């Protein structure tokens, strides 16, 4: 148990006004009343007013082994005292080297090389730059186009954000549109009325193939896809979709990049979901978050031996991959990742998620009884509750209803932090969650949704 510290919430909120947060709303900067999380242990968070809440989103899909692990603190502190940092440019360090070898054991297929970054966005950015570099070295500089999907989220650098397709994130920012193309979302819930899931899958695979043919296969470099589209609302593409998309990519010599920033390191009960869950071995995998369970910032790009060999071949133009970060292979982050992986393996976290995931999904699906809930979907320990104005038309509940925010507010009062996404609530708790805690979580969520539905009814905004 953590020491029970006391905090002055109002003072911290005043200090916090200097901090421009991610996805900041500048219009509400002066009056926003953020919850301030000050302490945490296991799956629980404590705010500065002493309220205890379940960490529904596991921080930001990352606190996989849970909060307050002494062993992590020790591993981090020991590495800080031994050697906190040195340049990764042409020099090595023991934890990053050991981590590289360990990760090669865990990745699927021949993805035995790793490029370390500072997080998920820089991993995606580096993966895309690597693909461009590869094609330049191979003497095909026109093979540059990148295909992604609506509803995808790949990060917040210029290039990774350009490959992201969440409509709301596109306002008042600029993006690369010349060589990045967004195909329609593979969300089966929003497939055309009367279309079967199988036909929808055919249509999504055809989207990909047709766009490659339209642009010219000699011009398309890569297709990037999340195994499950996390921030887009836990969208699980139709069965067989990834395998068939990979086959299309292979047919036209287009690289397949799996963005496993959320799905790797246990969220779906496996170190990586690509092969174990979706039966695909990508050319490149990006990851971050769960690699250290959020204890230190770290990202990674896994590159296949096949691609690395191509660059070493005599016909490839010799040059350096001039891409990297001061903190690539940071020794303290690497030490945290090694300890995190050791804990996950020792405690059987993968097995635990495979065992408890179906229970989590089954309990959450009970929420479909609530009239305002259009769909509950998910896999492993990630799920989304989507609210709609009308179940038959599946009309999403509009932004002005602030339904996600309302549900989050009610849930926080009752002891659960959820991640609101417009009309959706995303749940991805720490992977150590047990059955009674899942029950507690779902009960609070149910009450929060029901209370929000009552609010809307009272305000005349929703009629059932
Ligand atoms: C699939 C995916 N890719 C990339 C990113 C970006 O990662 P980061 O926020 O660590 O830069 C995220 C973040 O949520 C993500 O969900």
Image (cartoon, rainbow, N blue to C red):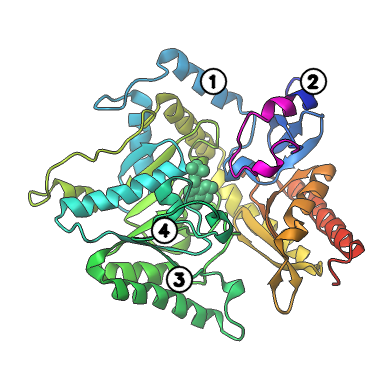
- What element does badge 3 sit on? helix
448 falls in the magenta region = no
**Against 39, is 165 above or below?**
below
Q: Is residue 377 left or right of residue 445?
A: left
Instruction: Look at the numbered disc 1 and say if its residue's Cβ is closer than 8 Å to ligand 1.
Output: no
| Residue that carries the numbered disc 2 in the rendered image | 6
Precedes in sequence: disc 3 or disc 4: 3
Q: CA–CA distance between discs 4 and 1?
A: 33 Å
Quarter of the rendering containing residue 118: top left
Residue 241 - label: 3
Quarter of the rendering containing residue 205: bottom left
**Against 70, is 377 above or below?**
below
The single residue placed furthest to the top in the displayed view is 81
Precedes in sequence: disc 4 or disc 1: 1
Q: CA–CA distance between discs 3 and 2?
A: 51 Å
Residue mark closest to the camera, 3 vs 4: 3
| Residue that carries the numbered disc 1 in the rendered image | 74
Residue mark closest to the camera, 3 vs 2: 2
Magenta region, residue range? 12-31
- The foreground one among 32 and 370 is 32
């Amino acid at each position: 148990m953590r020491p029970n510290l006391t905090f002055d919430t109002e003072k911290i909120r005043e200090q916090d006004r200097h901090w421009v947060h991610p996805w900041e709303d500048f219009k509400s900067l002066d009056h926003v009343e953020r919850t301030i999380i000050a302490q945490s242990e296991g799956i629980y968070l404590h705010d500065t007013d002493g309220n205890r809440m379940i960490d529904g989103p596991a921080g930001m899909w990352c606190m996989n082994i849970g909060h307050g692990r002494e062993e992590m603190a020790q591993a981090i502190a020991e590495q800080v005292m031994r050697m906190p940092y040195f340049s990764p440019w042409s020099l090595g360090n023991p934890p990053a080297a050991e981590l590289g070898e360990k990760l090669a054991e865990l990745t699927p297929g021949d993805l035995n090389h790793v490029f370390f970054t500072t997080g998920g966005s820089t991993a995606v950015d580096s993966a895309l730059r690597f693909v461009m570099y590869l094609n330049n070295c191979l003497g095909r500089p026109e093979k540059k186009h990148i295909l992604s999907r609506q509803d995808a989220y790949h990060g917040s650098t210029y290039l990774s954000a350009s490959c992201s397709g969440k409509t709301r994130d596109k306002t008042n920012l600029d993006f690369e549109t010349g060589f990045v193309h967004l195909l329609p979302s593979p969300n089966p819930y929003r497939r055309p009325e009367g279309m079967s899931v199988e036909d929808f899958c055919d249509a999504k695979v055809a989207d990909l193939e047709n766009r490659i043919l339209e642009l010219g296969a000699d011009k398309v470099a890569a297709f990037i896809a999340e195994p499950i589209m996390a921030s887009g609302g836990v969208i699980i593409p139709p069965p067989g979709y990834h395998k068939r998309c990979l086959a299309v990519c292979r047919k036209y010599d287009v690289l397949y990049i799996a963005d496993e920033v959320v799905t790797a390191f246990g969220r779906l009960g496996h170190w990586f979901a690509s092969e174990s869950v979706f039966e695909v071995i990508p050319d490149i995998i990006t990851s971050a978050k769960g690699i250290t369970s959020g204890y230190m910032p770290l990202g990674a790009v896994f590159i296949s031996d096949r691609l690395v060999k191509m660059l070493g071949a005599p016909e490839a133009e010799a040059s350096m991959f001039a891409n990297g970060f001061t903190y690539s292979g940071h020794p303290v982050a690497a030490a945290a990742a090694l300890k995190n992986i050791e804990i996950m393996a020792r405690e059987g976290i993968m097995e635990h998620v495979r065992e408890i995931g179906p229970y989590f999904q089954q309990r959450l699906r009970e929420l479909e009884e609530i009239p305002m809930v259009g769909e509950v979907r998910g896999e492993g320990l990630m799920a989304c509750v989507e609210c709609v104005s009308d179940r038959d038309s599946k009309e999403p509940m509009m932004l002005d209803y602030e339904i996600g925010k309302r549900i989050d507010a009610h849930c926080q009062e009752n002891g659960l932090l959820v991640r609101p996404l417009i009309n959706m609530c995303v749940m991805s708790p720490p992977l150590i969650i047990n059955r009674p805690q899942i029950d507690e979580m779902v009960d609070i969520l149910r009450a929060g949704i029901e209370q929000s539905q009552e609010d809307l009814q009272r305000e005349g905004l929703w009629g059932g």
